Image (cartoon, grey):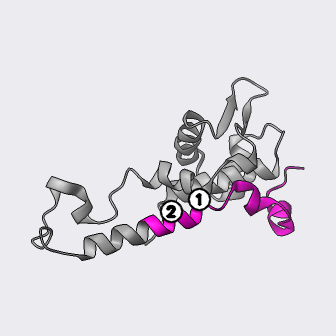
Amino acid sequence: MRLTIRTSLAMRTLMFCAVNNGHIVRKHEVAEACGASENHLAQVIHLLARKGYLKTVRGRAGGLMLGLAPDQIRVGQVFRDFEGVLPFTECSEGEGSTCPLSGVCQLKCVLSEALEAFYARLDTVFLADLVTGNHGLNQLLKVA
């Protein structure tokens, strides 16, 4: 299993904003720190803002900041919001599946249970858990 770039950028953006909590940060600062293009990051920021994780401020002094406290943002929910739109396997696609085994294969159930366990573990982690006391992360992401 490999996370999509969008999910990875979403988590990096949230961690950047959490390290700089209470301050408006600029998209180019996040892009530079996260090693992302501003165009790709704009799509991620848009979805994070739509879901309420971020607040965006327009204008000359604009930028973005957390829309929720770091201890209110569950990592599992962020992953679901970004990864949940993609089927994990072809057989998860329902009628669109071309797998000849889909009607009798029990692997589908095992994979589904494993995915549920994966998200259940991520649900125990909050954004605050990732940044609080993480001095190395603070040094990398803190805006001067």
User: How many numbered discs, if any?
Assistant: 2
Residue range highlighted in magenta? 116-144
Of 140 and 100, nearer the camera is: 100
* Image quadrant where residue 130 sits: bottom right
Question: What whole-number distance in Å separates the C-alpha atoms at marks 1 and 2?
Answer: 6 Å
Q: Residue at x 66, y 38 (%)?
A: 54
The reply to whether residue 36 is visible in this rendering is no
Give residue 82's position: percent from left, percent from top: 48, 51
**Residue lying farthest left?**
100
Element class at badge 1: loop
Give residue 56's position: percent from left, percent from top: 67, 31
- Which numbered circle lies on residue 123? 1
Was residue 100 drawn as part of the magenta stretch in this picture?
Answer: no
- Which numbered circle lies on residue 49? none
Q: Residue at x 79, y 57 (%)?
A: 141
What type is the residue that disc 1 sits on?
Asp
- Which numbered circle lies on residue 119? 2
What type is the residue that disc 2 sits on?
Tyr
Give residue 77's position: percent from left, percent from top: 55, 51
Chief secondary structure of the magenta span?
helix
Element class at badge 2: helix
Give residue 2's position: percent from left, percent from top: 46, 70
Left/right placement of residue 89 relative to residue 138 reads: left
102 vs 128: above or below = below
Q: Quadrant of the N terminus?
A: bottom left
Marks 1/2 in contact by CB < 8 Å: the verdict is: yes
39 vs 83: above or below = above
Few, some or many residues within 10 Å of mark 1 (<14, 14–19, 20+): some
Was residue 121 drawn as part of the magenta stretch in this picture?
Answer: yes
137 vs 65: above or below = below
Q: Residue at x 75, y 61 (%)?
A: 129
